[in-house]
Image: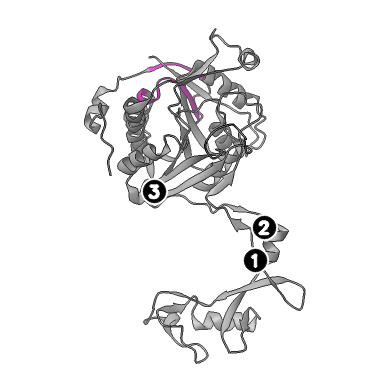
Amino acid sequence: MILAYGGKKGEEEIFKSIRECKLNSIKGNPKTNSKLIYGENIEVLNYLINHGGLRGKIDLIYIDPPFSTNNIFRMSQEKANSISRSNADNIAYDDSLIGPGYLEFIRQRLILLKELLSEKGSIYFHIDYKIGHYIKIIMDEVFGKNNFINDITRIKCNPKNFERKAYGNIKDMVLFYSKTGKHIWNEPKIPMSDEDIERLFKKIDKDGRRYTTIPLHAPGETKAGATGQPWRGILPPKGRHWRSSPDVLEDLDKKGLIEWSKKGVPRKKIYADEKEGKKIQDIIEFKDLQNPTYPTEKNLNLLKLIVSTSSNKDSIILDCFCGSGTTLKAAQELGRNWIGIDRSEEAIKAALQKLSSHQMNFLENGQEFEYLEQQIQL
């Protein structure tokens, strides 16, 4: 399915229409791979593709763009003063673009972002329920619907009791796509609660350890090979094969890790105290900050989860709507290189304050935080 709307351009036309930009000034340490760039993001992305040597080099993109709310978001007076504002109106960003113009604004940037993604790369698009279903169709078009991984629901706030003929809204969404299906994946786990352990591991052995059991076979018939052969005179059920070869099953049984039912059915024991945690599901709770330094600022722990799950230490993380720099801070704390882009002077100031005020003593060699600010001439 492809959305049709007025003003939609072909990819070749998009690239031809982007104005070339050039570096105007460089501040900080030019040796660092992390960059904070002030400028119009479509021009900067085009620069990074054609002149920055980053085509196919970005492992993770997270964006939290305007949501087409038809609002203008301002800094509070206190926050604006704290970052030495120069904008008399305290405007953080303008979200007045709506309708087909907004959809094409997003689509054009997604097309460039795909060019920057590596073969093992993925993109997370943070959006709300009012416009998210349109964005999903556009992302299917740009990245391919087969590369859609998850629609993640984020619980953003406590329940509200507004007088409104509708269900309360406590969520927004994050659309997660891979470029090729070969994306980096570091399985995220969270600790199991006592309630989880009691519910999932109902059995207790003679030593007082809680456990459960799982089948020794899995779907998929395997006639050739060890996992399709009899073990102790038993064949896997029809249409299934042993999860392990018979010699491995024999070793598990000798170690007391197989439980036999009264009818002679074997199952593998799984102990609660050997589990690293439980898999994170597609509903997550990272609520909005109570006293944000920047409008619509997202929770740092949400970004650290995304960065740690979908990138490695040698990865470059990109956020082309970086706002106050939460994605950049998450990447920096986790030892990744990053690139942040924003057209708002207030955003750049807020990001610089957030990054430079943080004690970066977690870096491996103990060096102080260094950044490269590249200001793009518009």
Separation (CA) of disc 1 from disc 3? 30 Å
Q: Is residue 51 visible?
A: no
Q: Quadrant of residue 269?
A: bottom right
Observer-nearest of 329 and 175 = 175
| Above or below, comparing residue 116 to residue 228 in the picture | above
Question: From this viewpoint, which residue is outermost toward the right?
Answer: 207
Q: Quadrant of the C terminus?
A: top left
Q: Name the amino acid, label 3.
A: Phe
- Of all residues, the one furthest to the bottom in this rendering is 233
Percent x, y for residue 138? 33, 38
Comparing labels 1 and 3, the label whose residue is closer to the camera: 1
* Neighbour tally class for label 3: few under 14, some 14-19, many 20 plus, Cα within 10 Å: many
Q: Earlier in the sequence, mark 1 or mark 3?
A: 3
Q: Amino acid at mark 1?
A: Leu
Earlier-in-chain disc, 1 versus 2? 2
- Residue underneath mark 3: 148
Rendered residue at 50%/16% (across/down): 345
Is disc 3 placed on a helix, strand or loop? Answer: strand
Identify the mark at residue 200; answer none if there is no mark. 1
Q: Are marks 1 and 2 in contact (CB under 8 Å)?
A: yes
Q: What is the CA distance from the residue labelled 2 to the residue labelled 3?
A: 28 Å
Callout 2, which amino acid?
Met
Coloration of the structure image: one colour
Place of residue 262 in the rendered image (x, y in percent of width and height, measured from the top left):
62, 89
Q: Earlier in the sequence, mark 2 or mark 3?
A: 3
Judging depth in this view, the residue of 372 and 45 nearest the camera is 45
In this picture, residue 257 sits left or right of residue 60: right
Segment colored magenta: 23-43
Q: Secondary structure at mark 1?
A: helix
Residue contact between numbered discs 1 and 3, judged by CB atoms under 8 Å: no
Q: Position of residue 136 (x, y in %)?
A: 38, 41
